[in-house]
Image: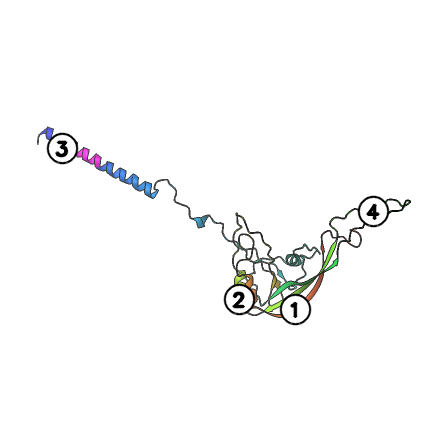
């Protein structure tokens, strides 16, 4: 082979190698476009962006037992604020060392109005007054007049297999929703768990992202049997609550 032939051969090999690497580079670029390689971040897992479900702090154990007349309980079942200075035990998750033996349900069976706003004073017409009669003072309408009601509250003892009910309470609440929620009123059952020593805790119901009970949670109460009822009466002010001393 002459020197010129050898040079031509080398130039031909370089040209073919260049075309080959060019094809490899184009193929690799195409794969990167399809597979999002390089510094392109991978698609985020939607589940990874969701806030975790939450469990409330542990409930306070009441050594004195359930209290259906506690302010927090009366407020929750009447939907009106009650403030007698006795808030009751703090609700929460059932402590792991608390062994429930029964359930107490607090409910209102009757509401009686004891005091209603006084009717407005009628002002006589001027033409009905005598010539020598002075004009009467016009009464000032009293806003937020007192309304006193008496609540009949039942403390209902429920017994039976509490395991399905405890399983419903152990469900985690959903994270608070960032979207719109349905407008509705829901009264969550006011309940206490009671152990064999008479101590009680007030468990917190698991709720969805809008604060409503998880589906089927309250229905587990239907599997328990009413075995006793204690009736209490408590007065509750609605609106401006004045006292006998004029406070």
Lower position in the chain sequence, tag 3 or tag 1 = 3
Disc assigned to residue 125: 4
Q: Nearer the viewer, residue 234 or 51?
A: 234
In this view, the mark in front (4 or 2): 4
Indicate the position of residue 1 as horizontal and vertical percent values.
Answer: 8, 32
Query: What stretch of residues is rendered in magenta?
Result: 8-19
In this view, the mark in front (1 or 2): 1
Mark 4 residue crowding within 10 angstroms, few (<14) / some (14–19) / many (20+): few
Kindly indicate whether the residue at mark 2 contacts the one at mark 1 (C-beta within 8 angstroms): no
Lower position in the chain sequence, tag 3 or tag 4 = 3
The rendered magenta stretch, by its main secondary structure, is classed as: helix
Disc assigned to residue 229: 1
- Give the residue drawn at x 64%, y 70%: 228
Q: Nearer the viewer, residue 220 or 143?
A: 143
Q: Secondary structure at mark 4?
A: loop
Lower position in the chain sequence, tag 4 or tag 2 = 4
Disc assigned to residue 36: none
Lower position in the chain sequence, tag 4 or tag 1 = 4
Indicate the position of residue 85 as horizontal and vertical percent values.
Answer: 70, 55
């Amino acid at each position: 082979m002459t020197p010129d032939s050898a040079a031509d051969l080398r130039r031909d090999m370089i040209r073919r190698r260049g075309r080959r690497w060019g094809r490899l580079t184009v193929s690799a670029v195409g794969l990167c476009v399809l597979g999002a390689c390089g510094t392109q971040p991978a698609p985020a897992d939607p589940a990874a962006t969701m806030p975790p479900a939450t469990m409330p702090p542990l409930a306070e154990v009441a050594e004195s037992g359930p209290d259906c007349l506690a302010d927090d309980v009366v407020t929750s079942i009447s939907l009106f604020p009650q403030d007698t200075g006795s808030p009751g035990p703090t609700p929460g998750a059932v402590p792991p060392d608390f062994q429930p033996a029964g359930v107490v349900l607090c409910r209102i069976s009757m509401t009686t109005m004891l005091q209603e706003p006084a009717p407005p004073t009628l002002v006589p017409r001027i033409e009905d007054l005598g010539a020598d009669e002075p004009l009467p003072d016009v009464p000032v309408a009293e806003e937020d007049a007192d309304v006193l009601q008496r609540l009949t509250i039942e403390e209902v003892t429920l017994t039976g297999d509490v395991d399905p009910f405890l399983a419903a309470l152990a469900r985690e609440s959903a994270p608070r929703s960032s979207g719109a929620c349905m407008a509705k009123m829901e009264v969550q059952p006011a309940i206490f768990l009671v152990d064999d020593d008479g101590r009680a805790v007030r468990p917190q119901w698991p709720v969805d992202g809008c604060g409503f009970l998880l589906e089927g949670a309250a229905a587990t109460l239907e599997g328990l049997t009413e075995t006793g009822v204690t009736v209490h009466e408590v007065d509750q002010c609605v609106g401006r609550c004045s006292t006998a001393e004029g406070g």
